[in-house]
Amino acid sequence: MVDTALDGYAVGRKLSKIGLKTSDTAELSFTDVKVPVEDLLGEENKGFSYLGQNLPQERLSIAVGAYAQASAAVRFAQAYTQDRNIFGKSVASFQNTKFELAACKAKVDAMESSVDRGLELHDAGELTAADAASLKLFCTEAASDVIDRCLQLHGGYGYINEYPIARLYADNRVNRIYGGTSEVMRSIIAKDMGL
């Protein structure tokens, strides 16, 4: 643990992100910081190993969040299209809107089943790195598609930050990056397949 009062520790500039605006991200600097031995967590030089042990659980939590975001997007789009009228009838009454919402709902249902399976494996202590990678890859990619389609159903208003779908669109994008990119997840899965 690093006491923030130690010499050499400094907080740099706050980074401006496209999403997750309520979560500050800043540059941290540790210039010649001397950490007392009694502040050591675990064993010296084992930090990366400790981090790796928690990656499957982290990836599971990212998948759960992606599922929740996609589910919310469908609710937002359904409510919006039922309230919004164009050409004298609700946007929800058009066949294309119905088909888009139905396809999004089907993806959200598949995500829910996958997340439930991942949670069961985790509870049983059987969630492997490959299971978690597969779950994160599927849920984050599916959520991205669902949220994009739901934003499209909002038309121009979907691009306006006062609508929750716009903020959700920006916030969701990082899910395919943090906890390991989609490309890294594919590599983990392929390795587990013996490829």
Image (spheres, helix red, strand yellow):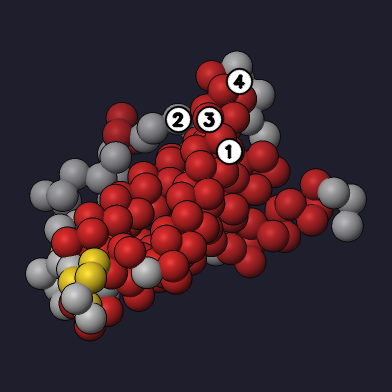
- Residue 125: assigned label: 4
Q: Residue at x 74, y 52 (%)?
A: 189
Quadrant including the C terminus: bottom right
Q: Is residue 115 visible from the viewing direction of this image?
A: yes
Please say if 120 is above or below 106.
above
Displayed quadrant of residue 18: bottom left
SS for tag 2?
Answer: loop
Looking at this rendering, what residue extends furthest in the top direction? 124
Residue under the image location 60 percent in, 20 percent down: 125
Q: Residue furthest front?
A: 88
Dot 3 and dot 1 residues touching (CB under 8 Å): yes
Mark closest to the chain's N terminus, 1 or 4: 1
C-alpha gap between disc 3 and disc 2: 32 Å
Q: Which mark is residue 116?
A: 3
Camera-side mark, 2 or 1: 1
Residue at label 2? 42
In front: label 2 or label 4: 4
Q: In the rendering, which numbered label is found on residue 114?
A: 1
